[in-house]
Image (tube, rainbow, N blue to C red):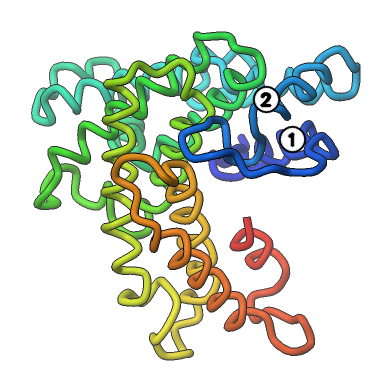
């Protein structure tokens, strides 16, 4: 069985291959125009045209299969393939009542430990991508449902007491990226109320974690150089928060300093992780993961 994170990274690579060469002469969309992350609305037409080409359609069908709420392919986890559907159900139940354990009948303890974490949201990124390209609402709607549940949990978790660790620094930046991509790629399917809720959650994540970017051992500096993990984690966290900031750029709740702070974080981390010969202390695997 492929590890969930590895599986997701492979799906991301397939998506990049599908989009390769499509975006020529990039023009930054004006504030409030979506999609704006990775591709814009002009690019969408070209990407949709690729579905008629055998090579690209093959790549896209793999992505689409693993974005389906009831996955029937060979990577189901759990084997019944209900991972996304079950995960969203648990998130929504938690958002309504975090203490209502009766809502989780049929969900194992190990599944619950995954689903009850906002970090699970990144598994819905392929669903949002499929909606953006095809306009098939079932993919966009399940991604929005999960994003809304996580956003609701964020508003309930002001004191950090709900689901310990769910929105910790490590998972919080990954959640911010997933929330941003769902907001951006599914923007046309969201209601005004949903857009407002997601924007507030993104702003809260940016504010909470960019303020902490230079004040935790798993970030950038001025932590001591013997904390090796600070190096590649810094690239990861700063880039995730930069994506979140760009998703709501110029919209309600945005702070212009967030984009520049995220960019500064990425550059500072790169300066620390790549030496003069282009080497990296943990080898090529981790730097490739970090630079993602």
Give how far across and how far down residue 91 sits, in percent.
28, 27
- Return the residue nearer the eye: 60 or 191: 191
Give how far across and how far down residue 230 sits, in percent.
46, 76
The earlier-in-sequence mark between 1 and 2 is: 1
Mark 1, other Cα within 10 Å: few <14 / some 14–19 / many ≥20: some
Total residue callouts: 2
Q: Is residue 217 above or below residue 258?
A: below
The secondary element bearing badge 1 is classed as helix
Which residue is painted at 77% across and 34% down in the image?
Answer: 19
Is label 1 in contact with label 2 (beta carbons under 8 Å)?
Answer: yes
Which residue is painted at 44% across and 14% down in the image?
Answer: 141
Give how far across and how far down residue 280 sits, in percent.
68, 79
Mark 2, other Cα within 10 Å: few <14 / some 14–19 / many ≥20: many
- Return the residue nearer the eye: 243 or 118: 243
Q: In which quarter of the image is the C terminus?
A: bottom right
- Return the residue nearer the eye: 144 or 189: 189
Q: Distance between the residues labelled 1 and 2?
A: 7 Å
Q: Is residue 90 left or right of residue 125?
A: left
Q: In this view, does 210 lie above or below 156?
A: below
Q: Is residue 120 left or right of residue 11?
A: left
Give how far across and how far down residue 152 sits, in percent.
21, 31
Instruction: Identify the residue position indicated by label 1 in the image.
Output: 14
Q: In this view, does 253 lie to the left or right of 238?
A: left
Q: Quadrant of the N terminus?
A: top right
Numbered tag placed on residue 63 in the rendering: 2
Residue 80 in view here: no
Residue 47 in view here: yes
Which residue is painted at 44% across and 55% down in the image?
Answer: 241
Numbered tag placed on residue 78 in the rendering: none
């Amino acid at each position: 069985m492929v590890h969930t994170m590895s599986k997701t990274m492979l799906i991301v690579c397939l998506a990049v291959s599908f989009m390769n060469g499509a975006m020529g002469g990039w023009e930054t969309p004006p504030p409030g125009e979506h999609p704006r992350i990775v591709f814009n609305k002009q690019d969408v037409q070209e990407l949709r045209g690729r579905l008629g080409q055998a090579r690209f359609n093959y790549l896209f069908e793999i992505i689409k299969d693993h974005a389906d709420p009831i996955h029937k392919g060979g990577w189901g986890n759990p084997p019944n393939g209900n991972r996304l559907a079950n995960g969203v159900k648990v998130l929504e139940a938690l958002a309504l009542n975090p203490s209502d354990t009766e809502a989780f009948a049929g969900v194992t303890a190990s599944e619950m430990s995954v689903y009850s974490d906002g970090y699970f949201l990144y598994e819905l990124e392929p669903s949002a991508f499929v909606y953006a390209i095809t306009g098939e609402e079932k993919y966009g709607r399940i991604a929005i449902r999960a994003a809304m549940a996580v956003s609701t949990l964020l508003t309930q978790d002001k004191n950090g007491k709900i689901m310990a660790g769910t929105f910790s620094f490590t998972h919080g930046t990954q959640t911010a990226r997933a929330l941003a991509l769902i907001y951006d790629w599914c923007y046309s399917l969201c209601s005004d109320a949903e857009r407002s809720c997601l924007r507030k959650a993104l702003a809260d994540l940016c504010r909470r974690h960019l303020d902490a970017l230079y004040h935790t051992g798993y970030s950038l500096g001025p932590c001591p150089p013997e904390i090796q993990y600070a190096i590649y984690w810094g690239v990861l966290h700063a880039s995730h928060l930069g994506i979140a900031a760009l998703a709501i750029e110029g919209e309600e709740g945005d702070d212009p300093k967030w984009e520049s702070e995220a960019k500064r974080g990425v550059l500072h981390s790169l300066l620390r992780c790549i030496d003069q010969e282009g080497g990296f202390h943990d080898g090529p695997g981790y730097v490739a993961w970090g630079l993602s």
